[in-house]
Amino acid sequence: MTRLAWVSIALVFSGCAARAGMGFGGGSAPPPPPPPPPAAPQSSAPAYVEGGGANYAPGEDAHWFQTDDYLISAKPYENKKLVLRVAKMSAAPTGQTKAEAQFLLANGEQLWTATYFRSRMANERDLRVGAIAFCFGGYWTSKAEPPKDKHAARQNEWFIAAITDVADLYKGRVTVGDASCAVGAVRVPVQ
């Protein structure tokens, strides 16, 4: 076989191999990955369930809170993490009670305290460093998720602290005090 024949065979083989994707020749680069789907818009309105539903009574939000629910503690909030419980006010504060109100906790206990907060579910505009927030979890919680049902939301602990980091907001998490909280587990005070 002549030298020209070998060169011709080599060229034919390399062209076929390149078209077959075997890495020969100057094939084009793979297409770039598709862009991520757009984030769901965050509503600024509280997540109240209008007519009730399978899991919510009329007027309850997605944490099973009603407009007359409070988060309370026997201790004062002093700008550090503090555990709170869900309660209903049974006697309003007066001058005679030293600005303390009486509350009925979800477990049936009664408590007089001046540390109580009305709250609503947080929206993205509320989540900024330094803002006060409530998160579903106890004092030792390091990673908090939303309550799974009404019993958990009302019987388990919540805590109050300042939001200390929002770098993971794109992942649906913020840091409240020292705990990473799912945005769906966060509430904010109502003024």
Image (spheres, helix red, strand yellow):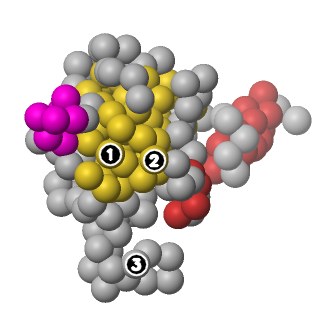
Q: Which quadrant of the figure contains the N terminus?
A: top right
Report, in whole angstroms, how far the alpha carbon at label 3 lies from the one at label 2: 24 Å
* Residue at left offset 58%, top offset 61%: 151
The mark found on residue 57 in the picture is 3
**Mark 2 or mark 1, earlier in chain:** 1
User: Which kind of residue does numbered mark 2 sit on?
Assistant: Gln
**Mark 3 or mark 2, earlier in chain:** 3
Magenta extent: 93-99
Residue behind mark 2? 110
Is disc 3 in contact with disc 2, using a CB cutoff of under 8 Å? no
* Residue at left offset 29%, top offset 73%: 59
* Snapshot quadrant of residue 41: bottom left
User: Which kind of residue does numbered mark 1 sit on?
Assistant: Gln
Decide if residue 137 is on the left or right side of residue 41: right
User: Which kind of residue does numbered mark 3 sit on?
Assistant: Ala
Can residue 183 be seen in the rendering of this structure? no
Can residue 86 be seen in the rendering of this structure? yes
Seen from the viewer's position, the closer of residues 51 and 116 is: 116
